[in-house]
């Protein structure tokens, strides 16, 4: 790995790691009586071995000029492995948390293992650990291919990847120690937030520099989505995390906003994290890997442009649908609801675009589990966005809010859309990256597909049922005009659904373990005898460059 | 703050609407302008070209 | 003429700016008016600030992720008002940095929990919820009763809160640690000063049932007992509506 860095990059890497280790030391000293100190030691414990690792490879020969005639894929490879590690860990914790709602004493009376602390471990591991690493890895892969240009240098992608995983690690270990801002999906404290901003700026610069050197005049639409993901997440992250730390020796900080402003800022962030992290980025993935795997160009490129601007513009307005009937002014609630409904148009345009691309390739969907992952993901994307718009309607929200229905909706999106499109893309890209003919085992991909699909369906149906029952029980009156059920009645009614949910989650987790094993074995098996054309595993279009015209064009 | 609440709400309600209409019109016209069609078709096919090396 | 977008794509920075502009206007139009909202929001002149002990308790509530299962926001719906009490007003969370409205009710809403149960009930419930509520799904929090509360840095906490807009006085900041001790230990010499600084209604009790150093349990119970009771503006407006 070090051998791919130039001498100057190796030196710079040592300097950066040295600075980071010093920052870690300062944190350890200033935060002696605080969890901040533990994080200081964690940073030192990670940076010092990395410094030695770079020094050990310092005198290996420099990479040849030839490298410039190849894409630089090592960071993408590492990112995909990291994503798989995070997803196995995150799903394990998620299922554990789900079983805690069945058997609440599964915390073993320890502080770190209680529901409130490990729930964010689950959400951060799967959203940021798995999703984020997959986005970084695939975006660097797609960016180079669609620009037909190599990444501008070798060090900055490693900085982004390692730095981003450091952020995730600080976040997750922090929750276990009780370090949290309590803002959902923005729990990490101020120092982790500052670090993420630095990483993110470098990530954006890689994008700008590569695009500036591109040989293809047009920027392919997948890159638009990736760019919107990078840019808007930066804006959201900075605004929502403005806070004043108690001191430089405290992990704790106090949000600049309070009450209703804080609620609006938080859900403006929260819903747009869904929009630009979990939708925009993964749409970028879909717009590249789905046509590639199907061997057909996207059904309508123009529709993808319209959906892009629609999603980029309208999502920003919808956050307030999380606050219906609260102390938030009503006009803001109405605005959020209206835009949530309008958002269905660009969302369905994207889902339809994906499915129509497969028109004429359905036999491939039948035979190829990888393509089927992407197809089902597009279906779930369509379903979830419809459900989301529906739940944003105020009277519907009166029933669904605060209940498990929301959890079901989120998981229809997170498992059905985000995870499936990611697994599909990873199964497509792993053989290309490692120059293998195909995945180690096609049957294991098939097995993973069915485990993931059945897990998702069981999970989502369980939560729909429990959520609607819960919502109805809370609002049912008896004949004398008093509430018919106590809160505890509704809690008891949830029990069977919580068992079903945890079972569905278990299936999904097992699928990810199968996937991890399959990817691991693909990497370990020797490359197929000197594959000259690395893309032999994708169905080659009839004649590259001039596919038959599609209906609607 | 110098500006009062009603002014800001008013601005949000009026300007926000016009902005929305103008933006969607611009995007639609751009996407469906006939002379852009060839360009987009090309863009859609460009990823499928079978090669795995940067152009130099 | 429609080469404009084409050029926009060619200049990546221009494209990036276009994305930011398109995306940020929605947020701006929605959020900016909320920062002038004090002009339209109801006033609560009698509202008091959290005491240092309650702030410490609130931080434990945040640390343990209680907000993941408990909301603190009663919506303007009949069944919620019947179940939990008068609906929440914006002003009630004006000193909440950050707000803890929550998004999920795996357990019940806590916005008006204060005074509903005794301190002993809360301590027993937190040590093992199933001792009190047999079907509860809440995790046990026994270690709170075993952990001494850190109070030496509460002055810094109050000072930071003042920086973000909570009206703490110099005196409150200077005596934060002593006040935290005094509020949880009514027999100590520090107790009386808490009442003079934070008002007659301040609850000064041994929330954890102990007499030595206050535990984290004392702080958390003190916080739970003040929920919904910093001001009575919500109850008053509910009473007026009923007349």
Image (tube, grey):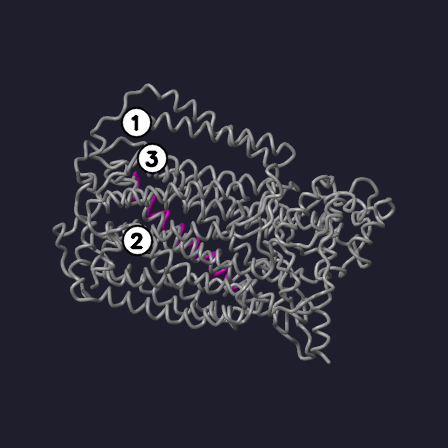
Q: Which residue is labeled 3 in the image?
A: A521
Q: What's the CA distance linking mark 2 and mark 3?
A: 44 Å
**Is residue A411 visible to the viewer in this orientation of the structure?**
yes
Q: Main secondary structure of the magenta part?
A: helix
* Closer to the eye: label 1 or 2: 2
Q: Which mark is residue C14?
A: 2
The residue carrying pointer 3 sits among few (fewer than 14), some (14 to 19) or many (20 or more) residues within 10 Å by Cα, namely some
Q: Nearer the viewer, residue A123 or B37?
A: B37
Same chain for labels 3 and 1? Say yes or no.
Answer: yes
Q: Is residue A287 above or below residue A202?
A: below
Q: Which mark is residue A6?
A: 1
The residue tagged with tag 3: helix, strand or loop? helix
Q: Earlier in the sequence, mark 3 or mark 1?
A: 1
* Closer to the eye: label 3 or 1: 1
Q: Nearer the viewer, residue A188 or C192?
A: C192
* Residue extent of the magenta highlight: A440-465
């Amino acid at each position: 790995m070090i051998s791919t860095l130039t001498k100057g990059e190796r030196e710079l890497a040592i300097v950066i790691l040295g600075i980071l280790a010093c920052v870690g030391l300062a944190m350890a000293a200033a935060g002696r009586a605080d969890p901040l100190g533990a994080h200081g030691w964690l940073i030192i414990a990670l940076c010092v071995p990395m410094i030695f690792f770079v020094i050990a490879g310092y005198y290996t020969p420099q990479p040849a000029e030839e490298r410039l005639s190849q894409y630089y894929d090592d960071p993408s490879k590492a990112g995909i492995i990291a994503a798989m590690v995070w997803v196995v860990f995150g799903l394990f914790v998620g299922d554990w948390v789900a079983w805690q709602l069945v058997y609440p004493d599964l915390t073993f009376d320890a502080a770190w293992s209680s529901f409130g602390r490990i729930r964010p471990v689950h959400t951060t591991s799967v959203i940021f650990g798995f999703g984020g690493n997959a986005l970084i890895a695939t975006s660097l892969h797609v960016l180079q291919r669609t620009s037909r240009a190599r990444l501008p240098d070798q060090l900055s992608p490693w900085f982004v990847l390692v730095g981003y995983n450091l952020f995730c690690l600080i976040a997750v270990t922090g929750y276990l120690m009780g370090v949290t801002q309590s803002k959902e999906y923005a729990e990490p404290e101020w120092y982790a937030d500052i670090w993420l901003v630095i990483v993110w700026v470098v990530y954006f610069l890689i994008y700008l520099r590569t695009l500036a050197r591109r040989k293809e005049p047009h920027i392919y639409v997948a890159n638009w989505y990736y760019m919107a993901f990078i840019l808007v997440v930066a804006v959201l992250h900075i605004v929502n995390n403005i806070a004043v730390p108690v001191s430089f020796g405290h992990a704790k900080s106090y949000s600049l906003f309070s009450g209703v402003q804080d609620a609006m800022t938080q859900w403006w962030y929260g819903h747009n994290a869904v929009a630009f992290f979990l939708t925009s980025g993964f749409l970028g993935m879909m717009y590249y890997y789905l046509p590639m795997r199907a061997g057909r160009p996207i059904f309508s490129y123009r529709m993808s442009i319209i959906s892009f601007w629609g999603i980029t513009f309208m999502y920003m307005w919808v956050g307030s649908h999380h606050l219906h009937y609260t102390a938030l002014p009503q006009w803001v609630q109405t605005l959020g609801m209206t835009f949530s409904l309008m958002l269905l148009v660009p969302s369905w345009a994207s889902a339809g675009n994906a499915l129509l691309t497969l028109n004429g390739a359905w036999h491939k969907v039948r035979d190829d589990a990888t393509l089927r992952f992407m197809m089902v993901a597009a279906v779930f994307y369509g379903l979830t966005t419809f459900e989301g718009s529906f739940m944003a309607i105020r009277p519907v929200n009166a029933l669904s809010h605060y209940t498990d229905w929301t959890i079901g909706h989120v998981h229809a999106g997170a498992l059905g859309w985000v995870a499936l499109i990611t697994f599909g893309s990873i199964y497509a890209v792993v053989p290309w990256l490692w120059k293998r003919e195909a995945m180690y085992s096609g049957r294991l991909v098939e097995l993973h597909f069915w485990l993931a699909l059945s897990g998702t369906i069981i999970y989502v149906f369980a939560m729909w049922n429990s959520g609607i029952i819960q919502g109805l029980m809370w609002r049912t009156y008896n004949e004398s005009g008093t509430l018919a059920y106590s809160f505890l009645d509704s809690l008891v009614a949830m029990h069977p659904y919580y068992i079903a949910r945890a079972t569905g989650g278990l299936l999904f987790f097992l699928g990810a373990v199968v996937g991890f094993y399959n990817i691991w074995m693909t990497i370990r098996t020797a490359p197929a005898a000197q594959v000259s054309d690395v893309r032999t595993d994708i169905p080659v279009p009839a004649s590259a460059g001039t596919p038959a015209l599609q209906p609607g064009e | 703050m110098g500006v009062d609440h009603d002014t800001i709400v008013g601005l949000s309600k009026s300007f926000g609407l016009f902005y929305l209409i103008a933006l969607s019109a611009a995007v639609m016209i751009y996407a469906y302008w006939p002379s852009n069609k060839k360009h987009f078709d090309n863009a859609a096919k460009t990823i499928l070209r079978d090669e795995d090396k940067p152009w130099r | 003429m429609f080469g404009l977008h084409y050029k926009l794509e060619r200049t990546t920075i221009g494209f990036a700016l276009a994305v930011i502009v398109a995306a940020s206007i929605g947020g701006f139009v929605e959020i900016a008016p909320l920062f002038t909202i004090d002009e339209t929001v109801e006033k609560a002149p009698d509202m008091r600030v959290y005491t240092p002990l309650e702030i410490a308790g609130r931080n434990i509530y945040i640390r343990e992720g209680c907000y993941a299962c408990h909301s603190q926001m009663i919506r303007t719906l009949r069944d919620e008002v019947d179940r939990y009490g008068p609906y929440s007003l914006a002003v009630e969370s004006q000193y909440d940095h950050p707000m803890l409205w929550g998004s999920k009710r795996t357990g019940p809403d806590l916005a008006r929990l204060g005074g509903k149960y005794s301190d002993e009930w809360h301590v027993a419930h937190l040590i093992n919820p199933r001792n009190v509520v047999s079907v509860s799904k809440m995790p046990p929090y026994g270690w709170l009763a075993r952990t001494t509360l850190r109070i030496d840095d509460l002055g810094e906490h109050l000072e930071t809160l003042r920086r973000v807009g909570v009206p703490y006085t110099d005196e409150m900041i200077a005596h934060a640690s002593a006040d935290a001790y005094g509020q949880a230990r009514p027999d100590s010499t520090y107790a009386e000063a808490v009442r003079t600084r934070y008002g007659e209604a301040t609850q000064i009790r041994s929330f954890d049932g102990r007499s030595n150093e206050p535990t984290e349990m004392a702080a958390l119970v003190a916080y739970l007992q003040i929920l919904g009771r910093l001001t009575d503006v919500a109850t008053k407006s509910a009473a007026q509506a009923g007349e």
